[in-house]
Amino acid sequence: MMWSPITENASRLSLEPLMRVLQVGDSLAVEYGGTAAACAELTNQLAHCGVDVSVITLGGSNGSGPTWPLDPAVAANICIPTGPRRLGYCRGMPEILESLAPQNVVHVHGLWRLHYLQSAHFARARSIPLIVSVHGMLLGGALRQRAALKRVSRWLFQDAMLRRAHCLHATASAEAEAIRRLGFQGPIAVVPWGVHPPAPSPSPSQSFASDTGPRRVVLYLGRLHPTKGLEPLLRAWAQVREQFAAWRLVVAGYDEGAYRSTLVALATELGIAEAVTFAGPAQGSAREQLFADASLVVLPSPAENFGFVVPEALVRGIPVIATQGAPWSSLVAEACGWWIPPGESSLAAALAEALSQSPKTLHDMGEQGRRLVRDRYTWDRVATSMVELYEWTLGRRVEPAFVQR
C-alpha cells in the first residue's frame, strides 16, 4: 500500500476555514506494520484534500529499514525519547507541540506510549478535539501481550485519556464492539483504512518453477511474530501439501524478535521445508512481484483490527483466506475468499478447498474482490470520512452516519 501521488481526477475538498490537523504516531518505519502505514497514508491523503497537516513520531526506531514516504507538503517532526523508547516519554514534546500550534484537531495513532498522553494533555489544555485510532490495541489478543504492564497503564492514564477523547476510531464494527466491552461509552467512528490501485503487475517470475512447470503460490505477507498465526499455518500446510504438491507456501515479512528461526525449525520438524519459502521483507517492486506470483493470499492471525494485506490482495485480483479474527466477512458475502475460524484445522480445510479450485474459479473470485475494494476501500473515501469526522468535532457539520454511540 505504498503512497503514490494523487491522480489528476481525484478531487480536493474545499475546507473553509482552513483546517489544521496534527497526526501523532509511533513511527513511519515500514517494519512497524499497519499502524505506521495507516498514519503515513492518512497524513498524505489529508494533505491532498487541502488539509494543513503535520505529523509527530518517535525517534530511535529499532531498525534502519525503509520508511513510508510523506507528501512534501506535510510538516514532519521527530521527537527523541527520554529514556526507554517503549515508554515513549519525550522531554522535548511540549516544545514541538507548541511550535505547531494552533491546531484544530489532534489525531493520535496508538496507545500505551507517553508521547500520546503528552499530545492528549496538549489538546485538552487548549480545548482541541482529540481523535484516537486504537489500531486493534484493545482487542483481546493485543491486551494479553505484556498484560500486566498494560493493566497498570490503563489504570494510570490510558483509560482516562480514551474517555476524554472526543471520538475513538475503529476500522470495523467488531473492533468497536470490543472497545464497548471494555466499558468505553463515548462516540466511536467506524472507518476502514484504504488501499491504492496497484501499478501494472509484473509478469510471474520463474522463482518457484519446478520440473513440471510453474508452481502455484499461497502467500503470507506480514510481520513474522507469534501473534500472527504462522505456526498453525505451517501445521495446516503440512496436512495438505502432499495432496497439492504443485503448490508452494511463501512466507514474507519483517522478522520480529528472531521469530523466523522458530518457523524454519518447525517447517523442518514437520517435513515441509522443501515446500515453504521464507522470503524476508519486501517493498516496492519486490512486493509487487510477490503478489504477481501468488494465486492465493492467507491471513492466519487469530486477531486483526483490519488486515491491510486483504484489500491489497483483492485489489490485485487475488482471493484471500482470512480468519474470523479479522473483519472480513465480506470475503464470503462477495464470493472473493474464505472467512474461517482461527486455528490449524480450519486453515487446513480452507486451504484444501481453495487449492482444489480451478484457475478460472480463483481468477473470477479475484475479480469479485477487485470490485469490492474499488467500491469500498479507497483512500479517497477514507480521507473524505476523516475530514467529515474532524469537521463534526469542530461543530461545522452534523454527526456523520459512521459514528456509533
Image (cartoon, helix red, strand yellow):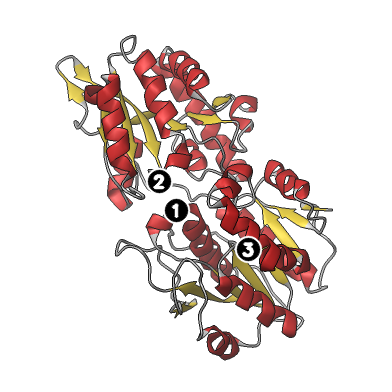
**Residue 223 marker:** 2
Closer to us: 353 or 92:
92
- The quarter of the picture where residue 339 lies is top right
Upstream in sequence: badge 1 or badge 3: 1
Give the secondary structure at mark 2. Answer: loop
Q: For the residue carrying disc 2, how many other residues have a C-alpha within 10 Å: few (<14), some (14-19), or many (20+)?
A: many
In space, the residues marked 1 and 2 are separated at their CA atoms by 7 Å
Identify the residue at image location x=37%, y=32%. 219
Q: Report the mark closest to the observer, 1 or 3.
A: 3
Identify the residue at image location x=78%, y=74%. 394
Tell me if residue 209 can be seen.
Answer: yes
**Residue 346 marker:** none
Position in image of residue 3 (x %, y %): 44, 59
Q: Identify whether 227 is placed above or below 212.
A: below
Give the amino acid type for the residue marked by disc 3 in the picture.
Ser
Give the amino acid type for the residue marked by disc 2 in the picture.
Arg
Closer to us: 289 or 404:
404
Position in image of residue 335 (x %, y %): 58, 24
Residue, disc 1: 33
Give the secondary structure at mark 1. Answer: loop
Residue, disc 3: 153
Q: Report the mark closest to the observer, 2 or 3.
A: 3
Is 10 on the left or on the right of 260, as rendered? right
Residue found at the very far left of the displayed protein: 211
In space, the residues marked 1 and 3 are separated at their CA atoms by 23 Å
Give the amino acid type for the residue marked by disc 1 in the picture.
Gly
Identify the residue at image location x=56%, y=55%. 379
